[in-house]
Image (cartoon, coloured by chain):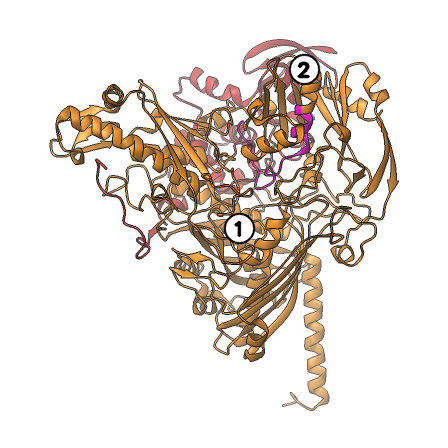
Amino acid sequence: MRSLRLNVNGDTLDTAAPSHWTLLEVLRYKLGLTGSKQGCDKGDCGACTVLVNGKPVLSCLTLAANAEGKDVQTIEGLMPAHRANGGQGADPIQDAFDRCGALQCGFCQPGMMLSARALLTENKAPTKRDIQDALSGNLCRCTGYTQILQAVETALVDEVGGDAPTPCWASCATNLGPAKGKTEPIQGGGV
Amino acid sequence: MAARDNHGTGAPWGGDFEMIGKSHRKVDGLAKATGEAIYADDIVLPGMLHAKTLRSPHAHARIRSIDTSKALALEGVHAVITGESMPTKYGVIPWTPDENALAVDKVRFIGDEVAAVAAIDEDTAEAALRLIEVDYEVLHAYFDPLEALQRDEPPIHETKKNNNVSKRVELEFGDCAAALEASDVVLDNEYSFHGSTHAAIEPHCAVARFAADGLLTLWSSTQITHYVHRALSHVLDVPPQRIRVIQPCLGGAFGGKSDPFSLEFCVAKLAMETGRPVKMLWTREEVFYAHRGRHPMQMRYKTGASKDGRISAVDANILIDGGSYSSFGLVTTYYSGQLLTGPYDFPNYHFDSTRVFTNKPPCGPKRGHGSVQPRFAFETQFDELAVKLNIDPIEIRRRNFQGTDTKTVNGQRVTSNGFMECLDQVEAASTWKDRRAKLPFGQGLGVAGSMYISGTNYPIYPNPMPQAGIQLKVDRSGVVTIFTGGNDIGQGSNSVVAYLVCEELGVELDHVRVVAADTDLCPVDLGAYSSRVTFMVGNATIDACRKLRSQVVEAIAAEWECDPKRVRLVRGVALDLEDPDRFIGMREAFHIAEAKFDTLGSTGSYNTPTLGGDYRGGTIGASPAYSFTAHVVEANVDEETGRITVPKVWCAHDCGRALNPMLVAGQIEGSVYMGIVEALMEDHKVNRFGLHSGPSLLDYRMATTIDTPDIEAYIVESIDPEGPYGAKEAGEGPLHSSIPALGNAIFDAVGVRLRDLPFTPAKVLAGLREKRETEEKLETGMDAAGVGDN
């Protein structure tokens, strides 16, 4: 057992855990910050990504003791930090992920959004390839990444301006009209 | 089908839709974005114990004895259970119960569950596992499905009459042999599909609490709450009214969380034994072994056609490697034949599918259950036919289109069908006519098409009750709460029911709450599988809304002393259509209705109409509506290394009415990704001992942002007469044809026909070598014959 003093989302928190516990375990099971997810527990999937001194780090491969004396930011800290800086609502990354359909099951997304946050804080003019590189350590099984990349581009537009991406669903819907001769639509109010 | 099940395809009030057809936020999007959403492993209960599973190190063995005394004596261990504590067999299909929560007498694959320990923490539980002594008698293990078919000693399941055969289905429609005989061309080839797994990023997890009053509560990462409820009651011998099953937020499933799993029974049993809450979280390695993924299939297809490319007959012979247990295998075996009969017209069709047991992780349903593999084989052979007859591969598909409002050769009713529009979309978007067969060597385009079910009228356990149910409750605050048994597994089903309620009742999205997948609170729904949720739960929701709406409208009309036809609920108000100045907010409208009719609420249900062919198994694969898809894939093949890259995929999917196009696009894009990646990178296989070749998310190679192709999704809306506002499925169909389209693109690129999945560089190089040798032989032959000298 080892006592730990961690700085998480701006709070100094004292806790204790077995000395072999990872930062992910301490965040989730000692501090109750369950937003950071465990997908593989061996550094393959990126779901546990948190920011340590602003850099994305795999918390499942980081001993909790090694995070002492550093600033740890988890997904729970994003919205409060945005508000503390005078922002409205959630962090633009979180909001864009929601608006762009990037959150399907949502399990990989805390890590994904923190990787994106680190990128956009550092680089205000990333290319699409920069965004792909920055997120390449975060596996998503639901989306095929398309709407995730659109969300990061959208968040960038929200923060620095420019043209938002045009997703395929904005323009490509076609309407063939109803199939023939089956049922009459129910019309009007009143029933 | 009852009248309640058909609501028309137009907007509920006539005219334009308010919510439907537009993209909206999901009801749980921000909760997921901020880390607030609670998944199974996020649940912590006071005094909770942690459980671990002891697994078999042998692929096939008899258990002579198990000694748990040392494990039980370890400090911090509270309970150890083995198979004898839960001897009742179960299976998701009631006809094939062959699984035990923990092994009884035998283990059938490496990873089979043998014992479970509950302790104060995971480390202690892990240490206790190492103290359990199991004496095994190792048996011959089967890894080759052909061997399992031919050899019967020792059998994998002693109780099976047909040795290692799990299920055989042979069906014939028309006279296949005669039609093939009479065909101008007959192609006859063998194809094989490898295994792949779901690899949802959230590992399986379950938490159980056994209260002093005898109520057992289970939180589980399941996509079918109702079947888990039934299975728990059956195996634990606890009456169902003493069990509550809750699905928390779910981190992906894709079919991999459809079966009742060992951990759900184990935590429940351990909680009952210890009187303390128990959690079990599987490691990623355990999830790979739990599997239930795509069945490997060895397929022989014969397709006959006329010179102008019209299919005359299809004959399929399929050997399915089921792994160690039945799981959904009965359905898989039917689906392998039954779901191929569109979007093309087969006048004659025969299939003979046999699923055998092997000593490998059990297979089950993965996105496109049972039909992705035959679709690969058939659409590849269809491409070969087009090449042989020198017909454009899109044109040959158009020539064989089955049409709308028709019946397939195996008796399935097809209503709406937008397949031709799907072909048009991908043909135009990919500039197919300018580029196919005209690109430089090493680059190619391929096409394929497919269809899939929107739910099935086969309810797994036969019963006359509805397949989907909804309850609505109205609060005096103006909030409408929807209670749905539907399982939101990330596809957005909770959001879809909310959009429908908004459309029907005129309330704003932030006035709607969704309570889902809790057996104590929600009406039964059969769960998230077979792409049934939007269609069935959507129809049930509209049904419930119409009942509630008529009460509100009647109450307002009485209040205003006007014809109810003048009252419309829209954009948060009740409005008099003939006097636009007269309107009241929906909260007040609900108050008026509650005063007139007492507490407001309603229920809604959906059941499929009677469907399917009039023969044994004719209802399996019978769906109230089918979705249709076409893909064009662009592939680059490196001649030197054999490496295949996919720069672009165009996918057009007919989902009926797109209730929320953004969510539909997400389903199409996710499907395309999953199909292309399983064809190129993934392989769920075991070595000669039955050990998984790479049970981690790194070794089981999945695509990242960098190696996922650029995906262009197109939504085609062939408004379906029976879907909710005309909607059909979007979650599984768009996977199917991505794989054969990729194989066909590889052929277009380098002239190598790959009939075995996965598509690896080694297979490309072997194909190129073989092609070169054939060409050289041909040249030598021509030289010898004196041909070609001029």
Q: Which amino acid is tagged 2?
A: Gly
Can the viewer see residue A22?
Answer: no
Of the residues shown, which amino acid type is indicated by label 1? Answer: Leu
Residue at the spot 32% in from the left edge and 20% down from the top edge: B599
Displayed quadrant of residue A87: top left
Q: In this view, does B637 lie above or below B519?
A: below
Name the mark nearer the viewer: 1 or 2.
2
B527 left or right of B278 in image: left
Distance Cα–Cα, label 1 vs label 2? 45 Å
Is residue B255 visible in the rendered structure shown here? yes
Q: What element carries label 2?
A: loop
Image coords of residue B212 (percent x, y): 62, 13
Q: Is the magenta stretch mostly helix, strand or loop?
A: loop
Quarter of the view holding residue B65: top right
What chain does badge 1 belong to? B
Front residue (pair A62, B44): B44
Out of B632 and B526, give the one closest to the viewer: B526
Q: Colour of chain B?
A: orange
Q: Colour of chain A?
A: red
Q: In which quarter of the image is residue B780?
A: bottom right
Q: Give the range drawn in magenta.
A: B248-268
Q: How crowded is mark 1: few (under 14 residues within 10 Å), some or many (20 or more)?
A: many
Q: Mark 2 lies on which chain?
A: B
Q: Name the residue under label 2.
A: B275
Q: How many labels does the image show?
A: 2
**Residue shown at 54% from the left, 16% from the top:** A9
The residue singled out by tag 1 in the image is: B735
Q: Earlier in the sequence, mark 1 or mark 2?
A: 2
Q: Pointers 1 and 2 in contact (CB under 8 A)?
A: no
Whether residue A127 is in magenta: the answer is: no
User: What residue lies at 65% left-to-right and 10% top-to-bottom?
Assistant: A15
